[in-house]
Image (cartoon, coloured by chain):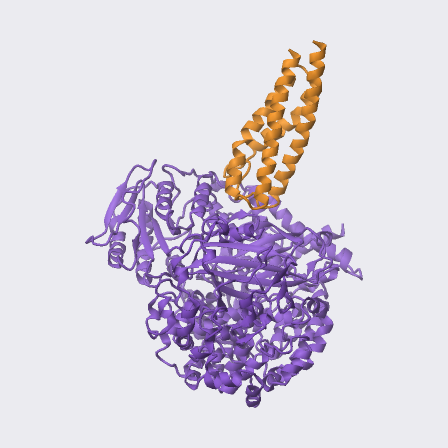
Amino acid sequence: MSTAGFNSQNGAGTGQPYSNGPSQNPVGLQQLPGAGYGSGHQSPFNLMQAKAPSPSVPGHYSPGPFQPLPPGSPYHLSPSPTAYPAPQGQPLLTAPLIGRPPSQTPPHSASSSPGLRLIPAQPTPPPPPAVSSSSYHQNPLQTAAPAWHYNTSQPTMRSPAPMILPPHGPVANNVNPAASLAGQSLPPPPLSSAAYNTSPPSPHLSQTQSQPQGLGMPPTSLHGYGQPGSAPPPMNPMAPHTYQPIRPAYGPPPTGPPPPMRPTPPPTGPPAASGTPPPTKADAQCGDSVNSTVSPTEPDCQEGDIECPGAVAGNGPQATNSYNHVDSKMAGLAQPGPPGRHLGHYPSLPPGYQNTSGPPAPSPMHPAMQAATQPYTQAPQAYQQMSGGPGMAQLSPSLASMSLQSGTPEALRVVNLLQERNLLPPTPISAPTPCLTQDLQRINCSPEVYRCTLTSIPQTQSLLNKAKLPLGLLLHPFKDLSQLPVVTSSTIVRCRSCRTYINPFVSFLDQRRWKCNLCYRVNDVPEEFMYNPVSRSYGEPHKRPEVQNATIEFIAPSEYMLRPPQPAVYLFVLDVSHNAVEKGYLNVFCQSLLDNINALPGDSRTKVGFITFDSTVHFYNLQEGLSQPQMLIVSDIEDIFLPTPDSLLVNLNECKELVQDLLKSLPSLFQKTMETQSALGAALQAAFKLLSPTGGRMSVFQTQLPNLGVGALQSREDPNQRASAKEIQHLSPATDFYKKLALDCSGQQVAVDLFLLSSQYCDLASLGCISRYSAGNVYYYPSYHHQHSPAQVECFQKDLKRYLTRKIGFEAVMRIRCTKGLSIHTFHGNFFVRSTDLLSLPNVNPDAGFAVQMSIDENLVDTQVVSFQAALLYTSSKGERRIRVHTLCLPVVNSLTDIFAGADVQAISGLLACMAVDRSVTASLGDARDAMINAAIDSLASYRQFALTIQQPGLLAPACLRLFPLYILALLKQKAFRLGTSTRLDDRVFAMCQLKYQPLAYAMPMIHPSLYRLDDLTDEGALNVNERTIPQPRVLQLSVEKLSRDGAFLMDAGTVMYLWIGRNCNPIFLTQVLGVPSYADVLDNLYVLPEIDSAESQRTRALIGWLRDQRPFYPSLHVIKDESQLKASLLQHMIEDRTDSALSYYEFLLHLQQKITK
Amino acid sequence: MEAAVFILSLVDCCALIFLAVYFIITLSDLECDYINARACCSKLNKWVIPEMVGQCLSTMLMLISLHWFIFVLNLPVAVWNIYRYVKVPMGNMGVFDPTEIHNRGQLKSHMKEAMIKLGYHLLCFFIYLYSMILALIND
């Protein structure tokens, strides 16, 4: 029965069923509830404080942080053995940190940093006292501090141990979003209590409405929510149907977690926010995480969260995750961190977040755009309002309900595409909000993590077919989150038949039974689940963190391990042929690795190894005791073997000096090589043999076509055919060698990341398989040269840094489950699908995205909502087995209009791109292009035919799909799919790879770049991030007509940015930003902006830096003049313009219209 | 002589029936998650060529013995088997590719194909049996 599913999950290791008998993991044992508990109190503290430091601490994983901890703290113990320092400390709780700390003991309050994050909410101070009273425990807690994690209150923890092990305190924080929120905002302890109250009001289990009232009683809750009480009514009309039926009794306390509301920014906090709204948002973000999601904005928030703590580094912050934060916190412990400090950190807004909030002005939208953008913006609006000061908060409920109601009509507003030229909203587009009750939506999974192409799921397959829109999910499951609840529990509650993890969308039939929301089986609530560690009360299973957070992480007990968690193992396979030496990448690589060697994620067991190859394969003996690294050359590449199997992979900590020696000498070692051949296949086989006992990550650097021994490839591209070919050949691999090897690697938990630095054809279509099926990444630097292309060198350096230091999960598997009646039939991304819904991911990294397509097998007639759950089981770099669970809930609708109203145009385009890549490989590029065009035609025709009541002339689209034709045209002109333009085969294949495995947020700018005018930047409407002011220029249409000779324009195309300087460009811009007196003096290959101390320069650099911070890879910047060679590549991105071989946007619309009306 | 041809065909047909059943069982194991995609595909790919040979054998037998109707009945299946084998892209690991089998409903279509073949072979089985008996009686 359940075993099958279960097993597979476990399978990460071997794929065998649990039944075999869980192999125990020594490491796993560490977490004894008791242990965690006892010492826990201190650690929690640490966490809090740590935050402050965190920003500065880049190395997330480094064990270092731990040390600072007080010896007594439980954390110490656990961390050293395994790993995640921070996490462990919190096993229970997790990151949320938020509010509690402040409230607790005064000293902690100092650590207010957490408090800041949460900011809860209470803009207005007044209520606090009342609040405290209201909450039940609160008072005791506050003063006693026992309960709270941060407080150190071990005392309180005492019994709860069974459930959530570790430090309750932390748990509590994590767990109760609401609580945290409230607490944080107000420094005074009482407030914190208030926060609490709101959430806990468990007493009122029954009705949501009733609850609010109940809550209302507690002073604080009222405050924030006060309104909420009233609010509920409005809401009900909309969503109630879906929601209530499911869990009538328990209804999440509607108001309970005020999260949605962002209290006014704490006085100190604001630094970041320019406008009032932003600050609040920031707060919200931090605080929200707990709740998980309020609305579209939330996702951003999460990112923001990350940044809040870590703040500074562009990419860095991303890399850091909750764990990191924790670590940092721990490290920070020593220093209580003055509150002020925290605030400072706090302010930083996550870039993403800001986007959403974009129009900082309280007035949500641009008036002009409002109508058009509404569908998109509505969520933000609601959000903002909520976040707004107290006054806003009061209004929020009604507003929210309004937005819900009005949302549908707005999304469906009929737009005649032929007449409305200016369709682009001035600010980035956020995901539509599913039409759920506010309560459900509040806890729903963030769209940054989980996005569905149709936020309203059709009831039947025939309805879906009628809408002609693809149904699928886009996931970013391992995204860096700053606030992630972590739960340690000896039993993880799952459905007995489908193995679904308990989640916020299950319904409790009574105290003892819950009904699975995926298979509808009724399950028992285990005894230990009855205890709620957050409120430390018994008999409230629905208040447990698992049931309050749609994104949560479990520390897995030993049943989830088939073998002891593997250590972090990194093997570098380097091409050292003549070509590689010419490129000069070795220097950069060795230097980067030397710089970041201490930041590699891992613990005391971390291992590294090196292999180099040209026509032979060279191994490096790094065994402890040698005075210098020993090179072993194996020239038998037909039958490769390991010369000394034991000493090639060595413990990094023990042999660090040897490794450093090797890295220093490596670049010079091959300086004079004349070997031009490349035996990549043999090197990969050797590397596989080396890694197969442990699993790990293999990073392969290749600079030419492998042409010797196994896996040798021939050049298949005819450069003369590039532009003229009607059909593109050779998009599929030439050999199955790399695919087979990748599957072998996958079976042994080895992932292969490929760095391709080649200006010649390398057959990426074949080579890429090695990464594609082993869940690796592909990086491609087509014109890399250490002297000739400094921009690419910089890019490579930055990417390497991110690559080496980002979080990593080993021996992972991901299972995506959906409600009975839906089934997944196609997967996109880098992984191997081991069984019907199980993805095998030898490594998982925070930059990987996944997409799946679904079909509706059974009619969903009796269901109001459906849920999707992605569970990622992985081994952290510290040797802990963890499960990250995301659950998304969406409404089911039965009318075509509702389906169209819920369409998410970005997700649809992203999914179509993935499907088109598949089609190009299995059929042909022409087919793929036709399929995309047909997708646009069919959906608009279907809209016209079935959803439109009044027939008008023109090309009509619902407002939510108004960008659909534009995105399709953008895809047709994208490097991956364009025809008629000279595109190198490898470039094309790489673009396809990116479309497949980039998360949607990163893929969108590659599909449809953004164009900004830079010479008239102002601070109006600017965002405030990390105390930097980020101007927010309007997004312009991608048409040459928007470029004017007297301006300067920035095009952000995802992986590259172009700064175009007009011939008559404003001289102030030239002197103040570029530092040159006149247009003629602008250098042709400029790729960095000089740091000039002027307002214009700062604004420009702030904007570019901010755009870069939003993605994990490093987009290089090219300054382009009229006569630059690169001008052509800029013009290729002008999607709305006509080119020799492609239609302009208007022509494309006419073409669509012709097809539709035919 | 004629009886010998049909006896041979009958044996061949039995083998094909077993093969079709084996395909169905293995694919449904994969569907139910009892084996993983890699194991399933390597098992099945081993039998793709034997199946093709078996089918061609009976087709040729009918052609040689000039049984036109049965030959025409056999021909499409033999052609399909050959076509399927020849059309495998270079990068794939055989007709059943573990990395593709869970995509685009391939598993279902493989299953459907195996079912249809099973039905077809059963039909052939009875035709051969009938013809064999007829041939024996005529002798």
- Extreme top residue here? B139
Picture coordinates of residue B27, whole percent (x, y):
58, 40
When asked about the image quadrant of residue A447, the answer is bottom right
Above or below: residue A124 compared with residue A983: below
Numbered marks: total: 0
Picture coordinates of residue A317, whole percent (x, y):
43, 68
Can residue A295 be spotted in the picture?
no
Spot the orange chain and give its letter.
Answer: B
Picture coordinates of residue A1107, whole percent (x, y):
48, 67
- Extreme right residue here? A950
When asked about the image quadrant of residue A568, the answer is bottom left
Picture coordinates of residue B131, whole percent (x, y):
70, 18
Above or below: residue A950 compared with residue A148: above
Instruction: Indicate left or right for A39 with A1032 as reference.
Output: left
Closer-to-camera residue (B87/A260)? A260
Above or below: residue A386 compared with residue A1148: below
Can residue B103 be spotted in the picture?
yes
When asked about the image quadrant of residue A640, the answer is top left
Above or below: residue A405 compared with residue A870: below
- Extreme left residue here? A627
Closer-to-camera residue (B84/A976)? B84
Spot the purple chain and give its letter.
Answer: A
